[in-house]
């Protein structure tokens, strides 16, 4: 039998902040990241941001429909974070 491990997943919400949340237009992050992807509730990737957008720290989401999304963030130290994003 296999055991599910979460050792490599950081879940401390104070480390990285996503704001404003909920939002209808855009959001920013409280720290520098390498890459960022947004997934819908079924796990389908709906957005991936390039280096230029990541450097500007403003992620446009006005084209997403209202709902709950998951933001997968890879930090510069290769830590992976997942944050919930609400589009209203």
Image (cartoon, rainbow, N blue to C red):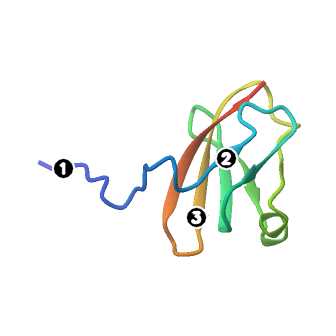
C-alpha gap between disc 2 and disc 1 = 31 Å
Q: Secondary structure at mark 2?
A: strand
Residue beneath disc 1: 3
Residue beneath disc 3: 74
Q: Give the side of residue 31 with respect to residue 87, left or right.
A: left
Count neighbours of disc 3 (C-alpha within 10 A) and say few if under 14, some if 14 to 19, many if 20 or more. Answer: some
* Residue 88 position in % (x across, y down): 78, 24
Which residue sits at x=58%, y=64%? 74
* Residue 22 position in % (x across, y down): 73, 30
* For residue 38, above or below residue 76: above
Can you name the residue that lies furthest to the front here?
14
Residue beneath disc 2: 18
Which residue sits at x=83%, y=42%? 61
Residues marked 2 and 1 touching at CB (< 8 Å): no
Q: Determine the image quadrant of residue 7.
A: bottom left
Which residue sits at x=80%, y=28%? 65
Camera-nearest residue between 32 and 3: 32
Q: Earlier in the sequence, mark 2 or mark 3?
A: 2
Q: Which circle, 1 or 3, is nearer the viewer?
A: 3
Can you name the residue that lies furthest to the left here?
1
* Residue 81 position in % (x across, y down): 52, 55
* For residue 41, above or below residue 71: above
* Residue 6 position in % (x across, y down): 31, 53
Q: Which circle, 2 or 3, is nearer the viewer?
A: 2
Count neighbours of disc 2 (C-alpha within 10 A) and say few if under 14, some if 14 to 19, many if 20 or more. Answer: some
* For residue 48, above or below residue 83: below
Q: Determine the image quadrant of residue 26.
A: top right
C-alpha gap between disc 2 and disc 3 = 13 Å
C-alpha gap between disc 1 and disc 3 = 24 Å
Camera-nearest residue between 19 and 25: 19
Q: Secondary structure at mark 1?
A: loop
Count neighbours of disc 1 (C-alpha within 10 A) and say few if under 14, some if 14 to 19, many if 20 or more. Answer: few
């Amino acid at each position: 039998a296999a055991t599910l491990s979460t050792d490599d997943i950081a879940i401390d919400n104070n480390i990285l902040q996503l704001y404003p949340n909920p939002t209808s237009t855009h959001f920013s992050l409280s720290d520098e990241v390498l890459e960022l992807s947004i997934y819908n509730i079924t796990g389908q990737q709906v957005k991936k941001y390039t280096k230029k957008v990541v450097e500007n720290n403003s992620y446009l989401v006005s084209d997403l429909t209202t709902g709950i999304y998951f933001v997968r963030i890879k930090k510069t130290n290769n830590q992976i974070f997942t944050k919930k994003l609400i589009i209203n």
